[in-house]
Image (cartoon, rainbow, N blue to C red):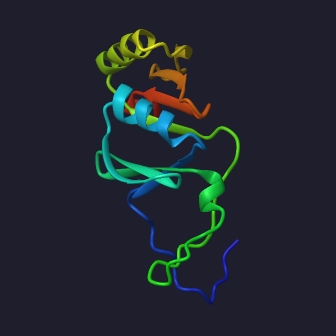
Amino acid sequence: MTDRSLPPAPVPDAILEASLYAQDLDSARIFYGGVLGLTEVVYAEGRHVFYRVGPTILLIFNPDATAQGSTDPAMPVPGHGAHGPGHLCLSATPDQIDTWRTRLIATGHQIDADFQWPNGARSLYVRDPAENSLEFAEPRLWG
């Protein structure tokens, strides 16, 4: 339902940032930077680690630290956070999914699921050290 007195909402054309939460940022760094090979952009010990994923930034926050919000008046980011497993899906070709499967198993990560959706797109699921569900899927999953 919309209020007719409001101007039309501009439609975002991309996701600039996506967040996951992990209390053990050292384990997150080993997984996302080491196993997945993502480029680390920013690290603040005990608070967060950020990675570049194409044009998007993956933010991994310690939920206890970010619940407090910023104490820097120049950057008044409000408190936020989540507890429990989240989900993130990364785009991958079929060959890349095969390579990810091999790499993840070789580094001791159990595959949760590997299947094809009704439209034929393949998804591979694994858990990060914080138990977030990480999916690698063909872009055609969403048409």
Q: Where is residue 2 in the image (x, y as percent from the top left)?
A: 66, 76
Placement of the N terminus among the 4 image quadrants: bottom right
Q: Position of residue 37 (x, y in %)?
A: 31, 32
x 46%, y 78%: residue: 75
Residue 30's place in the image compared with 70, above or below, is above
Residue 110 found in image quarter: top right
Residue lying furthest front:
45
Q: Position of residue 71 (x, y in %)?
A: 55, 76
Q: Can residue 125 be seen in this view?
A: yes
Placement of the C terminus among the 4 image quadrants: top left
Left or right: 63 with respect to 40? Answer: right
Q: Position of residue 124 (x, y in %)?
A: 48, 20
Left or right: 72 with respect to 42? Answer: right
x 66%, y 62%: residue: 67
Q: Can residue 143 be seen in this view?
A: no
x 39%, y 27%: residue: 138
